[in-house]
Image (tube, helix red, strand yellow):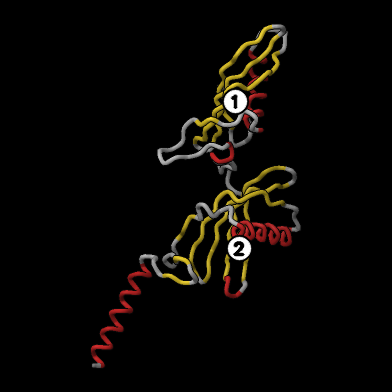
Amino acid sequence: MKMKNFSVVVFTLLLLSAFCDLGLCRGDDFLRMKLGGFHDCRGTQNSAEIESLARFAVQEHNKKENALVEFARVLKAKEQVVAGKIYYLTLEVIDAGKKKIYEVKLWVKPWMNFKQLQEFKQAEEGVSSFTPLDLGVKRDYHGEGWQAVPTNDPEVQNAANHALKSIQQRSNSLSPYELIEILISKAKVIEGYKKFDMLLKLRRADEEENFRVEMTKTNQGNFVLS
């Protein structure tokens, strides 16, 4: 009987171990990851919990460096299960009046009310501060493509004004162009660049003309007329 009970216990432990390796252990009402594994916090990166951690990181950085960085938003969030959790956050902040991107590493032990900022460094060039959702561009399961966006979107209007300047510079006319209306606007994000496809109604002197333009906004914030 004792041998039988011992076998049952061993079998149970092996079964639990297998489930844990697959990341299927449940506890505290959530599905745990495999220890040491990374997990994208998709859909929850803008949750109150993640934002609270991000604000904590900014506050700790300001205390340590005597800085005045302001939190703007969370761009990306990943977590790793260790003795607690390690959070890897990509933040957009306002530093000296300019938007900047920082990479943050936080160690959290909820049951001990423990939070420790381990890294707070500026992201390498090329890390984008914008996403398709910034323009109302919705990404479907087939990838990104041109999507209609509101013509009154500040980014669209900014792109249109830069397009107007570029058209004026390329024109030999002394009469300036005036932007009357953005008739159609589409946008997409490709490899870290925003692209805008717009139909603009312009006026020069007493004549009105429609211009189809495509503008690209680089990571440095520069607009280029294609």
Q: In which quadrant will I find the C terminus?
A: top right
Circle 1 Cα neighbour tier, 10 Å, few/some/many (<14 / 14–19 / ≥20): some
Residue position for label 1: 224
Between residues 150 and 111, which one lies in front from this camera angle? 150
Amino acid type at image mark 1: Val
Q: Residue 121: horizontal and vertical position, in percent?
A: 62, 53
> What residue is drawn where x is 60% and y is 75%?
112
**Left or right: 66 in relation to 157:** right
SS label for mark 2: strand
Q: Does residue 186 lie above or below 30 as drawn?
A: above
Between residues 14 and 94, which one lies in front from this camera angle? 14
> What residue is drawn where x is 28% and y is 79%?
11
Q: Residue 36: horizontal and vertical position, in percent?
A: 45, 65
Residue position for label 2: 118
Which quarter of the picture shows residue 115?
bottom right
Which quarter of the picture shows residue 201?
top right
> What residue is drawn where x is 52% and y is 35%?
189
Which quarter of the picture shows residue 204?
top right
Tag 2 or tag 1, which sits nearer the N-term? 2
Q: Residue 208: horizontal and vertical position, in percent?
A: 65, 10
Amino acid type at image mark 2: Gln
Numbered mark located on residue 52 in the image: none
